[in-house]
Image (cartoon, helix red, strand yellow):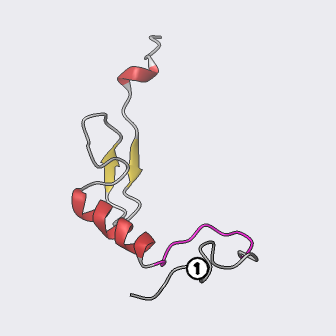
């Protein structure tokens, strides 16, 4: 029986956006996504607030207040 070092095994996982199975490799610049397209779609989802990290509402209100004049 031969032990295989963990560095020689490649993990396979689904892309968080499109669910396509891909290998976790250091030469994938879009990791954990399969492509730049999936990465940008996910970024857009965060920017449009379709994704959010749950937490308590901000009870302090706007951190900048009304101190800024209108343009």
Q: Which residue is mark 1?
A: 67
Residue 17 magenta: no
> Which picture quadrant has residue 56?
bottom right
Which residue in the rendered view is the most extreme toward the bottom?
A: 70
Magenta stretch prevailing secondary structure: loop
**Span colored in magenta:** 49-57
**x and y percentages locating residue 42 in the rendered image:** 37, 67
Left or right? Give the position of 56 relative to 49: right
Residue 54 magenta: yes
Residue found 36% across the figure and 22% down from its top: 8
User: Front-most of 33 and 19?
Assistant: 33
> Which picture quadrant has residue 19?
bottom left
Crowding at dot 1, Cα within 10 Å, few <14 / some 14-19 / many 20+, comes out as: few
> Which picture quadrant has residue 71?
bottom left
**x and y percentages locating residue 29 in the rendered image:** 26, 44
| Element type where label 1 sits in the image | loop
Residue found 62% across the figure and 79% down from its top: 65
Left or right? Give the position of 7 relative to 57: left
User: Front-most of 23 and 3?
Assistant: 23
Q: Does 27 appear above or below 67?
A: above
Residue found 28% across the figure and 54% down from its top: 34
Q: Does 65 appear above or below 19?
A: below
Q: Does 50 appear above or below 30?
A: below
Residue found 35% across the figure and 72% down from its top: 44
User: Front-most of 65 and 50?
Assistant: 65
Marker count (numbered): 1
**x and y percentages locating residue 27 in the rendered image:** 24, 35
User: Front-most of 42 and 63?
Assistant: 63
**x and y percentages locating residue 58 in the rendered image:** 71, 74
């Amino acid at each position: 029986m031969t032990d295989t070092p963990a560095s020689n095994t490649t993990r396979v996982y689904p892309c968080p956006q499109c669910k396509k199975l891909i290998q976790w490799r250091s030469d994938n610049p879009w990791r954990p996504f399969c492509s730049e397209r999936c990465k940008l779609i996910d970024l857009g989802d965060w920017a449009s607030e379709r994704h959010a990290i749950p937490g308590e509402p901000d009870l302090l209100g706007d951190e900048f207040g009304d101190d800024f004049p209108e343009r």
